[in-house]
């Protein structure tokens, strides 16, 4: 009797486990680099209006990533990409989402923002169920429930005065980012991971190009309140290239391996990373937040799907 079917099954299981391991590793790298930028944003927001910080951050990332994309993938691939669709996905999901998360941090604090982002797995799961790319299993549903519980416990450590509009901005930002991440991994199958990340960030830059002049016309503050010195420039470069550009690259690659729902679970462990960084900068340890984050970590483990559903390419 032939052993080919058994060998094929074993290879498929092995490939699936490798994809899961790679996807989770990429998600961890994405969240580490993302979390590292929150302290820099906290300092910069003291003198930078959110709208101008958002614009400069995304402009720096695009100015560096587009030339690298040209060199690695070639002009034909870059110029022939679906730029119109990328401007829609990136402008709405990445651009508006990033601006709103800066507004949320301005109104609250770094840890509060990443805790409120714990609704990401629920939003992302609903998106995948609607798209037909995920079947809801019991362990995943349990992981979502525990993740939300952890977020609620951690958020209970925040004074109610810090929530309100800031929390609403964080929730809307999370929903837009989940949708944009799924669309980026799904709708640009012909592009490399670098191309997918770069083209939607370029779309996000279009949002900045509209928001900044509009804010100026409306009389809103758009210029830094103090002179931009060398330390600020260093933080800006780090915040743009490392905490956004590199983090976005890792996350889109992770979504390609795991799907946006499972990849987004890793957002909920970010409070651990942010609290550790902020602790080193002098912030007090908060056991309630730590308990909430620990529950989120448990949810990430429980939600691992032994048979991950791949992201389906768009037929468009």
Image (spheres, rainbow, N blue to C red):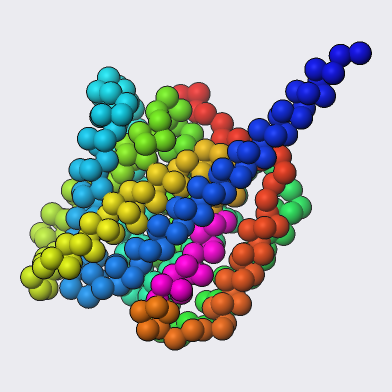
**Visible in this render: residue 240?**
yes
**Visible in this render: residue 51?**
no
Number of numbered discs on residues:
0
Q: In x, y percent, where is residue 263?
A: 55, 50
Q: Nearer the viewer, residue 126 or 245?
A: 245
> For the point 40% across and 78% down, which residue is it?
280
Q: In x, y percent, where is residue 25?
A: 54, 49
Residue 96 horizontal side relative to residue 187, left or right: left
193 to 114, vertically: above or below = above
Considering every residue shown, the one lying at the far top of the view is: 1
Q: In x, y percent, where is residue 102?
A: 32, 64
Residue 198 horizontal side relative to residue 21, left or right: left
Give the quarter of the image for residue 197.
top left
What is the magenta segment's predominant secondary structure? helix
Considering every residue shown, the one lying at the far right of the view is: 1
Q: Nearer the viewer, residue 145 or 21?
A: 21
Quadrant, the N terminus = top right
> For the point 40% across and 58% down, which residue is it?
34
Q: Is residue 235 magenta?
A: no
Q: In x, y percent, where is residue 56?
A: 19, 55
> For the point 46% across and 74% down, which residue is it?
275
Q: Which residues are magenta?
A: 265-278
Q: Is residue 271 magenta?
A: yes
196 to 125, vertically: above or below = above
> For the point 27% across and 40% down, which residue is it?
65
């Amino acid at each position: 009797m032939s052993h080919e079917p058994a060998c094929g099954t074993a290879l498929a299981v092995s490939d699936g486990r490798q994809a899961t391991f790679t996807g989770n590793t990429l998600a961890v790298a994405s969240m580490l680099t993302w979390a590292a930028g929150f302290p820099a944003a906290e300092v910069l927001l003291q003198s930078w209006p959110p709208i101008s910080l958002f614009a400069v951050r995304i402009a720096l990332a695009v100015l560096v990533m587009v030339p690298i994309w040209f060199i690695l993938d070639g002009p034909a691939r870059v110029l022939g990409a679906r730029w119109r669709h990328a401007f829609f996905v990136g402008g709405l999901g990445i651009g508006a989402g990033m601006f709103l998360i800066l507004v949320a941090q301005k109104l609250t604090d770094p840890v509060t923002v990443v805790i409120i982002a714990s609704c990401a797995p629920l939003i992302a799961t609903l998106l995948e169920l609607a798209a037909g790319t995920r079947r809801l299993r019991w362990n995943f549903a349990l992981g979502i429930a525990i993740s939300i519980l952890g977020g609620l416990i951690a958020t209970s450590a925040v004074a109610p005065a810090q929530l309100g509009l800031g929390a609403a901005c964080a929730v809307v930002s999370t929903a837009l980012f989940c949708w944009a991440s799924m669309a980026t991994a799904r709708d640009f199958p012909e592009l490399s991971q670098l191309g997918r990340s770069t083209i939607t960030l370029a779309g996000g830059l279009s949002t900045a190009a509209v928001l900044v002049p509009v804010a100026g016309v409306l009389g809103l503050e758009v210029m830094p309140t103090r002179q931009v010195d060398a330390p600020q420039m260093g933080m800006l470069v780090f915040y743009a290239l490392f905490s956004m550009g590199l983090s976005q690259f890792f996350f889109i690659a992770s979504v390609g391996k795991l799907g946006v729902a499972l990849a987004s679970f890793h957002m909920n462990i970010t409070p651990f990373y942010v609290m550790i960084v902020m602790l080193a900068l002098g912030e007090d340890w908060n056991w309630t937040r730590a308990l909430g984050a620990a529950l989120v970590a448990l949810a990430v483990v429980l939600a691992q799907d032994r048979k991950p559903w791949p992201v389906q390419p768009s037929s468009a």
